[in-house]
Image: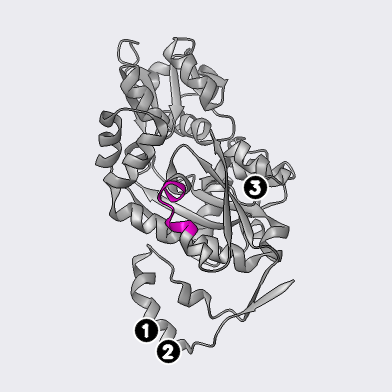
Amino acid sequence: MSVLKAPHIDRRSLLKLGGAALASGLLPPALVHAAQPERTRNTDTVRLGFGRGGIPLVARERGELEKRLKDQGIKVEWVGPFANHAPSMQAVVGGSADFGFWGSTTPALAAILAGSPLVFTAFNVYAPRSTAIIVKKDSGIDHVRDLVGKRVAVNKAGLGEFLVVAALEKFDIPRDKVQFVYLNPPDAGPAFAQGKVDAWSMWTPGVDISRHQNDAKDIFFEGTDLDFLIDYSSLVVTRDFATGNSALVRAVQDAYYEEGKWMSEHPLEAEEIARREGGYSEAVRDKLVSYARTNRFYEPDDKAFIADFQKAADWLAERNIIRGKIDVAAHSVKV
């Protein structure tokens, strides 16, 4: 085992150099993390999961993250693409990947409750959130209330399911009045297109692509219609990896923070990278650019954030979207 020792930096210098960036919330600077006395690293290769969009995809296509890590003697291998967070986490637990792909906290909580040895090491709050419940414009469905008696495709214990539950609750509609059809995105998209389900609750870019291709519209949009944030993007690893390779985890997170900052500042370029990978139209890309999303990162030592995350986890447990209560702080590791 190699132990990396950080140089001494006095607190006054730390605060002077890092205060402005911390205040913005956009990029926790590496200087602050250098104050920790030692970290471990047992490998020089890291396997990063990626999907069809988001920070890992942009990082993979740009190549800047790999350059940053190469400068620290770390080789990157990309694993994927994954359609959603569940198979990404399965790859981590199964040993074919070291990191998930900044996926939803909701299925991660479900996996941990089911016994997966996963921990959260970082969180991203991107705004505006763009998960939505969509229906075809000619469906006769114009409001969440019109979902009574209808079939809605959702991913179980994920963004899709919780958004429908929250929407029904907001308008006092009993859950048993709507038929939940549990499908993962690769199956839900065709089912919606073919009329096998009446509505689909899905995240970006899948919901934006389907909205465009299937002449669909929103009846509930997370960024404007959800009363409080229930789900976050998260980086997960196994607990053993977090403790045995804390220096590597720190390096990867800091590189991802740089990538997220670049994406916030260059939305057109970032969305064009995702468009090329996803093979969708420029019209969909332009819609995504119009959101002007920003990324803000948080870590397990942020007590205010963890308190909000705990409230979200309790909300999910109380509604049986996840199978029970969970102490989120106990499953979050600061490196």
Q: Is any part of residue 324 visible from this angle?
A: no
Pointer 2: residues within 10 angstroms few (<14), some, or many (20+)? Answer: few
Q: Nearer the viewer, mark 2 or mark 3?
A: 3
Provide the residue designation for mark 1: 16
Amino acid on which the number 3 mark rests in the picture: Ala
Q: Quadrant of the N terminus?
A: bottom right
Residue 270 percent across, percent down from the top left: 34, 46
Helix, strand or loop for the magenta stretch, by majority = helix
Disc 1 on helix, strand or loop?
helix
Amino acid on which the number 2 mark rests in the picture: Arg
Task: Name which residue lies at 43% across and 46% down.
Answer: 61
Task: Name which residue lies at 59% across and 30% down.
Answer: 156
In magenta stretch: residue 60: yes
In magenta stretch: residue 281: no
Amino acid on which the number 1 mark rests in the picture: Lys
Give the image quarter of residue 8.
Answer: bottom right
Q: Quadrant of the C terminus?
A: bottom right
Disc 2 on helix, strand or loop?
helix
Dot label at residue 97 = 3
Which range of residues does the magenta coloring cover? 58-66
Residue 243 percent across, percent down from the top left: 69, 65
Dot label at residue 269 = none
